[in-house]
């Protein structure tokens, strides 16, 4: 599937929420989608566009001059495994490097709660060069252990 990456853009939350609603195994709680939508509205966001349609997105949050986070990302189910996720991560990393950012982090469900969908997410981030730092049961609660992954952007 041919696609282009646009961004960073702001005010993209509606189309991003429509993608999250197509991924109920990851984003199954409507209140959580609305919370994401509020945050995404103000965050620099990269879009993947195929023809006229937005097929994937990534929102970036910069925490300080040295570190940024892949805050949330998603690719529509029918467009997955076509390189869109990788292209979105590369665009976000390139933008962050231009800002002088040295470390990228991402939070996801940790392996102590096995989940088929999130195993794919973890495999994706591993393939993108992220490495697990530590699992925190305190951040999202003990039923949703939060794994922090990091990647150095310096080399
Ligand atoms: C995770 C996600 C963003 C990846 O996007 P994608 O466009 O499907 O990923 P890509 O096609 O760029 O994958 C790049 C590489 O990552 C790895 N990878 C991606 N998905 C994988 C999976 N489900 N299982 C194993 N490896 C995977 C592969 O090495 C892949 O290369 P290959 O297809 O040549 O083997 C997408 O699957 C998604 O939206 N998942 C649901 C929501 C989610 O997990 N969001 C992130 C947490 S907030």
Image (cartoon, rainbow, N blue to C red):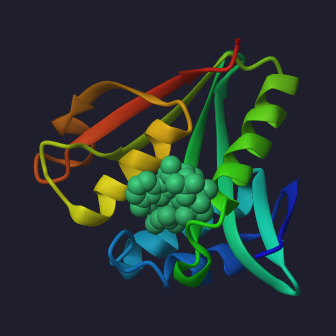
In the shown orientation, is residue 6 left or right of residue 153?
Answer: right
142 vs 80: above or below: above
Residue 40 visible in the shown view: yes
In the shown orientation, is residue 120 left or right of residue 81?
Answer: left
Tell me the residue at 57%/83% (across/down): 78
Q: Where is residue 96 in the image (x, y as percent from the top left)?
A: 77, 30
Residue 72 visible in the shown view: no
5 vs 33: above or below: above
Q: Position of residue 122 (x, y in %)?
A: 37, 46
Q: Where is residue 118 in the image (x, y as percent from the top left)?
A: 31, 57
Tell me the residue at 83%/35% (across/down): 95
Which quadrant would the C terminus be assigned to in this image? top right
Tell me the residue at 40%/69% (across/down): 32
Judging depth in this view, the residue of 60 and 48 nearest the camera is 48
> Quadrant location of residue 29?
bottom left
Which quadrant would the N terminus be assigned to in this image? bottom right
Q: Position of residue 135 (x, y in %)?
A: 24, 31
């Amino acid at each position: 599937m041919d696609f282009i990456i646009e961004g960073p853009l702001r005010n993209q939350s509606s189309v991003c929420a429509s993608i999250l609603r197509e991924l109920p195994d990851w984003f199954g709680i409507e209140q959580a989608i609305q919370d994401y939508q509020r945050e995404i509205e103000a965050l620099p966001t990269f879009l993947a566009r195929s023809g006229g349609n937005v097929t994937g997105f990534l929102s970036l949050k910069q925490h300080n001059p040295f570190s940024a986070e892949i805050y949330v990302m998603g690719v529509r189910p029918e467009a997955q495994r076509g390189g869109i996720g990788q292209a979105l991560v590369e665009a976000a990393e390139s933008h962050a490097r231009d800002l002088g950012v040295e470390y990228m982090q991402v939070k996801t469900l940790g392996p102590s709660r096995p989940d088929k969908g999130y195993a794919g997410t973890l495999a994706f981030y591993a393939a993108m060069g992220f490495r697990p730092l530590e699992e925190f049961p305190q951040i999202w609660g003990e039923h949703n252990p939060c794994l922090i992954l990091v990647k150095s952007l310096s080399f």
